[in-house]
Amino acid sequence: KNQVEQSPQSLIILEGKNCTLQCNYTVSPFSNLRWYKQDTGRGPVSLTIMTFSENTKSNGRYTATLDADTKQSSLHITASQLSDSASYICVVSDRGSTLGRLYFGRGTQLTVWP
Amino acid sequence: EADIYQTPRYLVIGTGKKITLECSQTMGHDKMYWYQQDPGMELHLIHYSYGVNSTEKGDLSSESTVSRIRTEHFPLTLESARPSHTSQYLCASRPPLGVDEQFFGPGTRLTVL
């Protein structure tokens, strides 16, 4: 069964600190993995996207890693800001359908305190 | 930021009412999707469309229906709303070629009393 598991479920950090969010998946055949940021009451917005051959990708203070062998990904946030408070969702796409089927994790709820 | 719009953003209605959630995109994307999301839970695909006059049910069973008469428009209808329909509904679209990514609208938060 294709699944995406994220940890931790929630995280509280102080402004300026770094944090790392984890994602494990069992989706096969694998196409790509994305990290989305979803602010409360809004739709998800893409942060990074990685294919099978990529093992790291950065977008400003966000750095995602991918280990396709162990089917794990992480999202590292550097020098956190209050605006980073949001849910971070790991999304994996399979290669087996023209629909572009996405498998969603439940997200990690990050809260940044001043 | 993608040009995909949803209205209304928030809706509170009574049981038994008929409602239509609007979704439109100005990017000319063929594929469009409706997801349902409860707090703290993952998004579940409830409907999708490959293009005009194409609609399919997703993974999660839903009493809602959709239509795709125009490329840019993908409305979702509930004939008789119930409290169990209370949820956030997210619309997304995907370009036909090249970028393998779905762009999401801001969502509609539906509460049925």
Image (spheres, coloured by chain):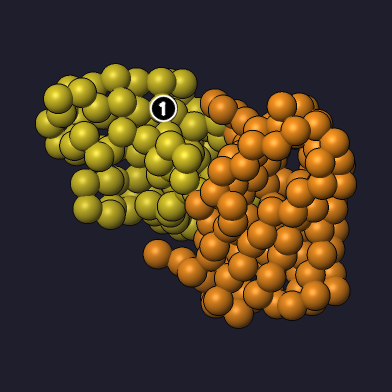
Chain colours: A yellow, B orange
Q: Quadrant of the N terminus of chain B?
A: bottom left
Residue drawn at 50 percent across, 52 percent down: B106
* Amino acid type for the residue under numbered disc 1: Gln
Percent across and percent down for residue B24 are 61, 67
Question: Can residue B28 be seen here?
Answer: yes
Q: Quadrant of the C terminus of chain B?
A: top right
Tell me if mark 1 has few (under 14), some (14-19) or many (20+) residues whose alpha carbon lies within 10 angstroms of its own: many
Percent across and percent down for residue A16 are 12, 31
Q: As displayed, is residue A95 above or below residue A43?
A: below
- Judging depth in this view, the residue of A52 and B67 nearest the camera is B67
Question: Can residue A3 be seen here?
Answer: no
Residue drawn at 85 percent across, 74 percent down: B53
Q: Which residue is mark 1?
A: A109
- Judging depth in this view, the residue of B86 and B40 nearest the camera is B86
Q: As displayed, is residue B98 above or below residue A13?
A: below
Percent across and percent down for residue B110 are 64, 38
Residue drawn at 59 percent across, 46 percent down: B108
Residue drawn at 47 percent across, 40 percent down: A41
- Judging depth in this view, the residue of A62 and B29 nearest the camera is B29
Q: As displayed, is residue B16 above or below residue B5?
A: above
Percent across and percent down for residue A46 are 43, 54
Mark 1 secondary-structure assignment: strand
Please count the marks in the image.
1
